[in-house]
Image (tube, rainbow, N blue to C red):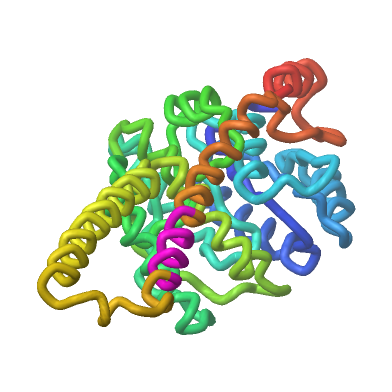
């Protein structure tokens, strides 16, 4: 089979109602470009018929390749596996739920041919999402933009095209708590954006509830910013300064006013509880970073494969050895 010029990577988790339409739309767009392509579908431990449909699509069209995880490892790890197996000169990451329209890939390809090495998609509007989801997403992007040294473009997700040089650079970064869009900004290269309207999910339900979004935000912040640790230091200095000031006020009050205003334990208890709360928060922040260090030190593989279909025996084996 001819080596693909473009690789489309789509992580999938319980997407049986979407896969046929995803393949139809992507094949229509990529066939219109007129150059060899492949679609790398990563099954992230689905419990429905997703893996069976993936194999069916591969039998119908060998350009569809399948990476099947032994269990669920999470969206960012599934994206990483797709990048590991992708063979194209340009690699596009797209979610399987069709909220990111495959038609935008044509605009990305045009920008890539102009010489840009990363082309990210910027959301101008998000259909079918609650005001809370839009508000928290907007807040997250602006927060991460301000507190990190790496300037991650606002209102962008993982939907993007990357040159082979960029993909090879990302494959060298094997941290476990991954934030792909931040890592893509960190490696540099020439980057630009294209604008689009994010559609409603084609079928099924979202796999990113608030709990997962909160963990994702923690991974982004702890992976690209030391500000939480610095805030703990600032809080310590602030409380120490307030305590010193309060001690001076108490001494003056006892000398010139008398001890009567300071009878009782309510003020003392409030101060002790406040300081204790700050200490626990600080320990929690340190624990988040320490836990991530522990995960890295264990040195486990990022993912475990059940099988990889359509890549060729020797190539799939070399990629397995690389990730393990």
Magenta-drawn stretch contains 210: no
Going by the image, does 307 lie left or right of 40? right
Tell me residue 123's x, y (percent): 39, 66
Residue found farthest to the left: 256
Tell me residue 58's x, y (percent): 81, 44
Residue 230, located in which quarter of the rendered image?
top left
Quadrant, the N terminus: top right
Asked if residue 105 can be seen in this view, the reply is: no
- Residue in front for this viewpoint, 270 or 15: 270
Going by the image, does 243 lie left or right of 267? left
Q: Residue at x 68, y 24 (%)?
A: 299
Going by the image, does 46 lie left or right of 219? right
Q: Residue at x 62, y 65 (%)?
A: 211
Residue 140, located in which quarter of the rendered image?
bottom left
Magenta-drawn stretch contains 273: yes
Tell me residue 45's x, y (percent): 81, 50
Q: Residue at x 21, y 66 (%)?
A: 250
Asked if residue 130 can be seen in this view, the reply is: yes
Going by the image, does 184 lie left or right of 254? right
Magenta stretch in the rendered image: 269-279
Residue 202, located in which quarter of the rendered image?
bottom right
Quadrant, the C terminus: top right
Secondary structure mostly taken by the magenta-highlighted segment of the chain: helix
Q: Is residue 303 above or below residue 48?
A: above
- Residue in front for this viewpoint, 138 or 24: 138
Q: Is residue 249 above or below residue 40?
A: below
């Amino acid at each position: 089979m001819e080596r693909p010029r473009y690789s489309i990577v789509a992580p999938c988790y319980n997407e049986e109602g979407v896969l046929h339409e995803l393949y139809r739309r992507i094949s229509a767009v990529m066939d219109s470009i007129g150059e060899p392509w492949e679609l790398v579908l990563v099954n992230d431990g689905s419990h429905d018929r997703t893996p069976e449909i993936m194999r069916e699509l591969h039998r119908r069209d060998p350009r569809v390749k399948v990476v099947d995880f032994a269990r669920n490892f999470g969206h960012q790890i599934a994206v990483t596996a797709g990048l590991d197996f992708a063979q194209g000169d340009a690699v596009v990451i797209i979610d399987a739920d069709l909220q990111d329209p495959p038609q935008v890939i044509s605009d990305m390809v045009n920008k890539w041919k102009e010489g840009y090495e990363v082309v990210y998609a910027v959301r101008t509007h998000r259909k079918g999402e609650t005001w809370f989801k839009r508000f928290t997403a907007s807040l997250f992007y602006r927060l991460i933009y301000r507190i990190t040294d790496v300037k991650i473009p606002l209102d962008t997700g993982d939907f993007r095209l990357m040159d082979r040089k960029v993909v090879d650079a990302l494959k060298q970064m094997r941290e476990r708590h991954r934030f792909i869009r931040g890592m893509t900004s960190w490696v540099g290269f020439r980057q630009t954006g294209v604008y689009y309207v994010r559609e409603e999910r084609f079928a099924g339900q979202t796999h990113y509830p608030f709990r997962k979004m909160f963990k994702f935000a923690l991974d982004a912040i702890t992976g690209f910013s030391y500000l939480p640790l610095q805030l703990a230091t600032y809080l310590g200095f602030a409380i120490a300064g307030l305590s010193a000031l309060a001690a001076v006020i108490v001494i003056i009050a006892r000398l010139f006013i008398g001890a009567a205003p300071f009878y009782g334990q309510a003020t003392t208890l409030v101060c002790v509880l406040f300081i204790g709360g700050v200490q626990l928060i600080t320990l929690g922040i340190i624990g988040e970073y320490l836990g991530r260090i522990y995960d890295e030190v264990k040195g486990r593989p990022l993912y475990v494969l059940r099988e990889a279909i359509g890549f060729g025996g020797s190539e799939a084996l070399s990629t397995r050895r690389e990730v393990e």
